[in-house]
Amino acid sequence: METIYGLTWDSSDPNTDTYGSQIAYKRTGLVLYQNELQPAGKKIHWWETQIPAGDAQGPHYGSKVLPQLPRQEKFHLVLDGVVTPEESVGLMLLTYDQHHQLVNETMSLSKQLTFELTDEEVDYEISLVKFNNEQLEFRAVFIIPERVWRTFTVQPRFDMAAIDLVPKRTDAVATTGTVIVRSFNRVVDATPLSEHWTVEPHRIVWVTADWSATDLAQKLTAFKTEFHLRSVQLVGGDLISQKLLVDVERSDN
């Protein structure tokens, strides 16, 4: 089973450089960040596999810890956000050995970064790093397994808190698609794909408490129209999203 991880930015997360920062946390999950005082090369926000010592963790802090990914397998990071000016925020991966000594450091300014962890790299950190940035509109960072990356073109949908998986195969036209609905309540959200997932368009949508059945129904209709689909399978990722899907089905009847 392949899993796509979505990393979001929580207002209570200690892993944020707040000195001199202007940060607006929207109810939709969008984060607006500006800091004119911050020097180039400084981390804006980061996620890690270790729980920071001495930080207030709370009952749900486990959802903020990065997953221990399989070693010797490729993964791809994708930044879903608007960076002004372009290429002014870097995606950085830091890896550490069992003694928490730095093993490797990799960075990209292109909103994408490919990496592969070794057995020596016990822990890792993913961070956003500022350069000549004036403003960052942040939605998420996604961790995409190599098999999914090879099969689909990954398209973050910044306008709707979603990500599209568009089949790269062009020899067959898909008539069905899948929409997976997740609720926006975990900093590190794991979305498993079915073991029998087919090469058809997928859309993963993260909803908040503000979403109504009408809002979701509009997104489903748009997905069906955009990819010229006859039918769409709906999958609720948790209890909140499942309830919303039930409301959508009732509204259709």
Image (cartoon, grey):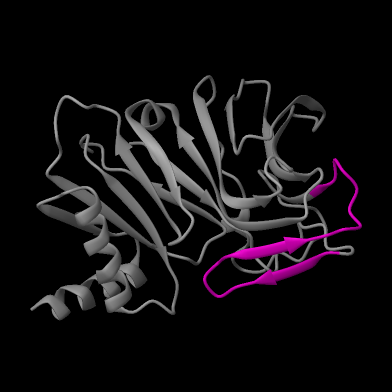
Residue at horizontal 12 percent and vertical 76 percent from the top:
252
Which residue is more in the foreground, 171 or 26? 171
The chief SS type of the magenta part is loop
From what the image shows, is residue 153 above or below residue 209? above
Q: Is residue 186 left or right of residue 17?
A: left
In the image, taking residue 108 as reference, residue 219 lies left or right, namely left
Quadrant housing the N terminus: top left
Quadrant location, the C terminus: bottom left
Of 194 and 157, nearer the camera is: 157
Q: Quadrant of residue 108?
A: top right
Q: Is residue 166 magenta?
A: no
Q: Residue at x 14, y 46 (%)?
A: 176
Residue 175 at what x, y percent from top left? 11, 44
Q: Is residue 124 left or right of residue 202?
A: right
Quadrant of the rendered image containing residue 96: top right
Residue 168 position, x and y percent, is 30, 29
- Residue closest to the eye, 233 or 221: 221
Residue 161 placement, left or right of 8 = left
Measuring from the top left, give residue 46's x and y in whole percent: 71, 49
Q: Residue at x 48, y 46 (%)?
A: 5
Q: Is residue 166 above or below residue 191?
A: above
Could you say where residue 226 lies in the image, as x and y percent from the top left?
Answer: 25, 52
Above or below, 89 against 181 in this view is above
| Count of picture labels | 0
Residue range corresponding to the magenta coloring:
21-43
Q: Is residue 242 above or below residue 138?
A: below
29 falls in the magenta region: yes
Q: Quadrant of residue 251?
A: bottom left
